[in-house]
Image: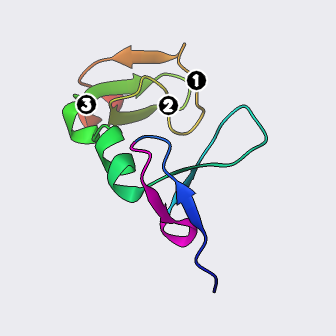
């Protein structure tokens, strides 16, 4: 396998193409980012608080940091609540 050097979009260092990740962009040229810059750029999901939701359409109770049902992907049927199994029966 050939080692082709590319430039990282964030830190501008030269890295091997096999070690780089492709960044989606609006242009047709490929942009690359190194793994260390990608790890620094990501925000961990631990920082976002998880809220208890109940979807009235699916009758599904879940905890998530996003306000959308994982089954129907709707947001208009969600209710923030602490629904227990006894409430549903």
Say whether residue 16 is magenta.
Answer: yes
To which residue does mark 3 refer?
A: 50
Q: Quadrant of the N terminus?
A: bottom right
Check if mark 2's residue and mark 3's residue have beta carbons within 8 Å.
no
To which residue does mark 1 refer?
A: 74
The answer to whether residue 53 of the structure is visible from this angle is yes
Residue reaching furthest to the bottom: 1
- The location of residue 73, given as percent across then percent down, is 58, 30
Which circle marks residue 69 in the picture? Answer: 2
- Name the residue rendered at 50%, 38% in the picture: 70
- Name the residue rendered at 48%, 49% in the picture: 8
- The location of residue 43, given as percent across then percent down, is 31, 37
Q: Nearer the viewer, residue 54 or 33?
A: 33
Specify the quadrant of the image occupied by residue 12. top left
10 Å neighbourhood of mark 1: few (<14), some, or many (≥20)?
some
**Start-end of magenta stretch:** 11-19
The answer to whether residue 89 of the structure is visible from this angle is no
77 vs 12: above or below: above
Mark 1 falls on what kind of element?
Answer: loop
- The location of residue 34, given as percent across then percent down, is 43, 55
Q: Nearer the viewer, residue 43 or 55?
A: 43
- The location of residue 55, given as percent across then percent down, is 46, 25
10 Å neighbourhood of mark 2: few (<14), some, or many (≥20)?
many
């Amino acid at each position: 396998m050939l080692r082709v050097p590319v430039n990282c979009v964030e830190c501008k260092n030269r890295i091997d193409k096999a070690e780089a990740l492709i960044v989606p962009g609006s242009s047709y040229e490929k942009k690359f980012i190194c793994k260390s810059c990608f790890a620094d750029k990501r925000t961990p999901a631990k920082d976002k608080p998880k809220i208890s939701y109940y979807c009235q359409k699916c009758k599904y109770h879940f905890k998530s940091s996003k306000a959308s049902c994982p089954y129907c992907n709707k947001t208009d049927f969600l209710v923030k609540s602490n629904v227990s199994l006894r409430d549903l029966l």
